[in-house]
Image (cartoon, rainbow, N blue to C red):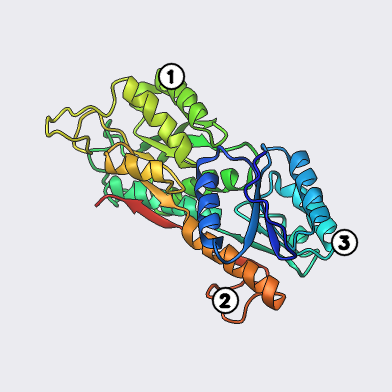
């Protein structure tokens, strides 16, 4: 558990992150802290991927007199108890990045959610891949290595049962079907959003399917980066055309597409290893969270000049953005 900041006042805001070694959450936390500097007094807690620990942290902050909770829940089901508890002490809450059940958010009029639509990221990920394969489902280009008119792909999936993992995995496949592409999923492996597990699971997939794999779809960038590491070790991504860079013209290049747009992924794209990602706009999300928090503290709710649309009085949606090199 990490505590950042010790100053106490009636306007102290408490920020709870489900765990600190998640690449995207690390980036988002930094953006929130940067956005809050000079605007909010904020304490930050990492919950070690334990809903029990997070609940205890929230209880402690209630006793300390925190005026507002910003909660990235460990378990979206756990949001129910959090809302009920904070309602009982009249402490407003902004959930973010892991969406509570709609019924739980509706329990109290001082509970909000800021995040991105997982289905949008799955569709954009498919669009990036379809563009690479020629944007014509009836005439795939040279990346259809076996020339069978079908894209053979593997999926690295986030946490089993996690809302975003399930939605991203389903919608990326549906987007191919809706556009008329034939997509054959050779395997789907759960790697829990984790770089090391992405490395291990991709190694097993390479052993089993080898050159049959034409596309790697990863639910997030961390798993994609892990996959690229083992792919490089096994001889992929070599400068076979001798032009001094890794690029799509190399014989041993394989498309990998991630989601999140974390800084490490941007570097991998610039170096030619990762084909593309779908940017989960942490800077805009941080601005939306901090500005909403300010309004709740000073005006009692969504500020009058709030620059983001609020759906059903509860939801602030931040759009994903596709990102790749041209």
Task: Return the residue nearer the eye: 285 or 182.
Answer: 285
The structure residue drawn at horizontal position 42% and vertical position 48%, both measured from the top left corner, is: 261
**Which secondary structure lies at badge 2?**
loop
**Above or below, 289 relative to 184:** below
**Above or below, 196 relative to 224:** above
Of the residues under marks 3 and 1, which one precedes in the sequence? 3
Q: Which mark is residue 208?
A: 1
* Residue that numbered label 3 is attached to: 88
Give the quadrant of residue 91.
bottom right
Q: Residue 46 carries which label?
A: none
* Crowd tier of the residue under label 1, counting other residues whose Cα lies within 10 Å: few below 14, some 14–19, many 20 or above: few
Give the quadrant of residue 19.
top right
**Which secondary structure lies at badge 3?**
helix
* Residue that numbered label 2 is attached to: 306
Q: Residue furthest top?
A: 207
Position of 289 compared to 254: left or right?
right
Give the percent coordinates (x, y) of residue 125.
42, 49
Give the percent coordinates (x, y) of residue 33.
55, 55
The structure residue drawn at horizontal position 76% and vertical position 46%, both measured from the top left corner, is: 57
Of the residues under marks 3 and 2, which one precedes in the sequence? 3
Q: Which of marks 3 and 1 is in front?
A: 3
Mark 2–mark 1 distance (CA, rounded to whole Å): 52 Å
**Which secondary structure lies at badge 1?**
helix
């Amino acid at each position: 558990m990490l505590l950042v900041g010790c100053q106490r006042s009636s306007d102290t805001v408490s920020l709870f992150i489900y765990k600190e070694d998640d690449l995207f959450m690390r980036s988002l936390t930094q953006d929130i802290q940067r956005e809050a500097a000079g605007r909010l007094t904020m304490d930050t807690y990492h919950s070690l991927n334990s809903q029990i620990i997070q609940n205890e942290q929230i209880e402690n902050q209630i006793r300390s007199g925190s005026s507002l909770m910003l909660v990235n829940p460990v378990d979206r089901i756990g949001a129910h108890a959090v809302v009920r508890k904070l309602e009982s002490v009249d402490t407003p809450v902004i959930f973010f990045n892991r969406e509570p059940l709609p019924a739980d958010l509706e329990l109290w009029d001082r509970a909000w959610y800021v995040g991105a639509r997982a289905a949008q990221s799955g569709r954009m990920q498919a669009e990036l891949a379809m563009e690479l394969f020629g944007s014509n489902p009836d005439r795939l280009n040279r990346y259809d290595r076996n020339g069978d008119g079908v894209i053979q792909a593997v999926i690295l999936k986030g946490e089993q049962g996690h809302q975003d993992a399930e939605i991203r995995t389903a919608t990326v496949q549906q987007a191919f079907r809706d556009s008329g592409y034939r997509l054959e999923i050779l395997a789907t492996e759960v790697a829990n959003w984790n770089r090391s597990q992405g490395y291990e699971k991709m190694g097993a997939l390479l052993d089993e399917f080898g050159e049959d794999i034409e596309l790697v779809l990863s639910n997030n960038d961390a798993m994609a980066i892990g996959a690229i590491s083992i792919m490089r070790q096994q001889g992929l991504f070599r400068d076979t055309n001798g032009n001094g860079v890794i690029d799509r013209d190399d014989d041993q290049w394989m498309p990998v597409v991630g989601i999140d747009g974390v800084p490490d992924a941007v570097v991998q794209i610039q170096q030619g290893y990762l084909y593309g990602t779908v940017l989960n706009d942490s800077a805009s999300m941080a601005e939306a969270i901090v500005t909403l928090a300010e309004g709740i503290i000073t005006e009692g709710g969504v500020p009058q000049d709030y620059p983001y649309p609020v759906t059903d009085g509860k939801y602030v949606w931040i759009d994903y953005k596709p990102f790749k090199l041209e």
